[in-house]
């Protein structure tokens, strides 16, 4: 019997790939080795693809990883904790409860996975599972938490949204020797006809939960009861954005006071007027938009796309306009979040990167954002490559003009014959 996996290749070139796919793969690998890209955004590298993240205070981030783990990491040292909350599949979503809910002084995180469950655990002790939320019959794709109440929301590939209530005092969970199993107090199913990919709460009162997914529609729910929100002025009709403006999967949604932003595989990000449910702004892209982040304080929206780039759009003055491009990641942008004066991006390239908002928005060095210290490194690398190319061409030219020993002998014989004539 041969060694298990001996005939399994990890090199993607050994699978059937088109020329375009091979070219894209080679370009991606070249970018990953780029010394500038390795420093841009001071990347944190947990050693696996980052599928989701949530911020926990100013110094800590909780990461959902493809390696079937959720981990905490220090944003200053860019190092992950050794301990992890372990799942039976990729961790597709994470969230952190507000700071009033703690256990032994530690903030509380939640991690959702392909294994159909959500785990509740202390950020300082990820292996200590306090509770398990069970009820979904398929992958859990997204999770959200109420900003002031111990209420959790989950969306799944089973097309349902579940509402969960944690104990008012989480210290009671810590006193148990085994994780407490918690059932949902409300399940919403039937309104969405596809997988639930994203949810968000209105940032003003947190009374409304918005949900969206593969059916390209958006729905709204009372965040405490799970009852569908009625259309303003028409109590008999549910608040609802139908498939149409978005043609296919909506991967992300974020709400501001008056606008709901959505990001879609149809290459657009849309800002919807929440009251009228009409499109205020449409941001056209050349590829799938995987994440969206409004930053109303400075009048911009950040979008992340499938090839790993970030785009900063000015949306508060007339026609929306891209004012900045950041070649941040080498694979899909998976998540965007803001905290004060900075925003963070994660990607399937296995990095979490940090961006100063004012530095990006007010950058005067061109369309592509590049800090001065990295621009110098980029110029140096470009100069070095040009020197190498020149040397290679010179060497090639010399080799082409040089004669082999046999050619020199034949030439000597030819010259000798000419002399005899």
Image (cartoon, rainbow, N blue to C red):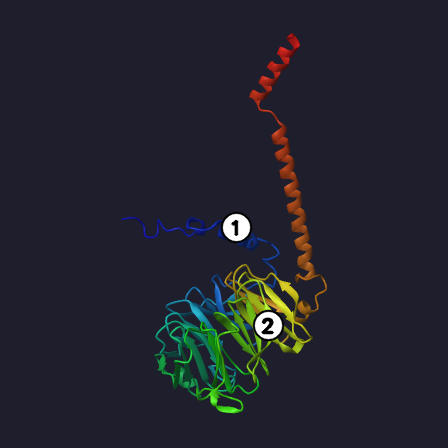
Callout count: 2
Name the spot of residue 53 as percent of width and height, x first.
Answer: 51, 71
Residue drawn at 61 percent across, 15 percent down: 414
- Tell me, yes or no, if residue 108 can be seen here: no
The secondary structure type at the circle numbered 2 is strand
Q: Quadrant of residue 277?
A: bottom right
Q: Is residue 315 above or below residue 207?
A: above
Q: Nearer the viewer, residue 115 or 212?
A: 212
Q: Which mark is residue 324?
A: none
Report how far apart the C-alphas of labels 1 and 2 lie in the structure: 31 Å
Q: Is residue 156 left or right of residue 58?
A: left
Residue pushed farthest right? 364
Residue tagged 1: 23
Q: In terms of secondary structure, where does tag 1 sit?
A: helix
Locate residue 340: give its quadrant: bottom right
In the picture of the structure, the residue carrying the numbered disc 2 is 282
Q: Position of residue 279 (x, y in %)?
A: 58, 77
Q: Residue 303 at what x, y percent from top left?
A: 58, 69
Question: Which callout, 1 or 2, points at the residue further toward the start of the chain?
Answer: 1
Q: Quadrant of the C terminus?
A: top right
Q: Residue furthest left?
A: 1
Q: In percent of the image, x 66 and y 46: which residue is there? A: 384
Q: Is residue 330 visible?
A: yes
């Amino acid at each position: 019997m041969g060694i298990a996996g001996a005939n399994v290749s990890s090199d993607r070139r050994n699978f059937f790939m088109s020329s375009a796919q091979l070219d894209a793969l080679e370009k991606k690998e070249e970018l990953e080795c780029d010394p500038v890209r390795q420093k841009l955004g001071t990347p944190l590298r947990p050693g696996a693809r980052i599928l989701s993240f949530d911020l926990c205070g100013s110094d800590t981030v909780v990461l959902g990883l493809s390696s079937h783990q959720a981990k905490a990491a220090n944003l200053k040292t860019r190092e992950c904790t050794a301990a992890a909350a372990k799942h039976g599949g990729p961790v597709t979503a994470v969230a952190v409860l507000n700071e009033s809910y703690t256990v032994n002084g530690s903030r509380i995180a939640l991690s959702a996975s392909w294994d159909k469950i959500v785990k509740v655990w202390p950020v300082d002790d990820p292996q200590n599972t306090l509770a398990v939320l069970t009820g979904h019959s398929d992958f859990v794709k997204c999770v959200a938490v109420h900003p002031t109440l111990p209420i959790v929301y989950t969306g799944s590939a089973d097309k349902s949204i579940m509402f969960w209530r944690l104990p008012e005092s989480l210290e009671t969970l810590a006193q148990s020797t085994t994780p407490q199993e918690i059932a949902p107090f409300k399940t919403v199913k039937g309104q969405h006809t596809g997988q639930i990919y994203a949810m968000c709460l209105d940032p003003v009162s947190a009374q409304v939960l918005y949900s969206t997914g593969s059916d390209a529609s958006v729905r709204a729910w009372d965040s405490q009861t799970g009852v569908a929100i009625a259309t303003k002025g028409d109590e008999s009709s549910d608040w609802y954005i139908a498939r149409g403006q978005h043609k296919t999967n909506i991967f992300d949604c974020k709400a501001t006071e008056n606008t709901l932003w959505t990001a879609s595989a149809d290459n657009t990000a849309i800002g919807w007027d929440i009251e009228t449910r009409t499109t205020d702004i449409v941001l056209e892209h050349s590829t799938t938009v995987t994440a969206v982040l409004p930053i109303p304080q400075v009048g911009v929206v950040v979008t992340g796309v499938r090839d790993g780039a970030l785009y900063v759009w000015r949306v508060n003055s007339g026609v929306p306009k891209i004012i900045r491009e950041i070649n941040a990641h080498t694979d899909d942008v998976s998540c965007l979040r803001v905290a004060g004066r900075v925003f963070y991006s994660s990607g399937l390239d296995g990095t979490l990167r940090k961006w100063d908002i004012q530095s990006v928005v007010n950058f005067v060095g061109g369309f592509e954002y590049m800090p001065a210290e990295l621009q110098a490194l980029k110029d140096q690398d470009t100069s070095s490559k040009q020197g190498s190319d020149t040397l290679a061409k010179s060497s090639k030219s010399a080799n082409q003009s040089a004669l082999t020993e046999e050619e020199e002998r034949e030439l000597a014989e030819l010259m000798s014959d000419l002399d005899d004539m």
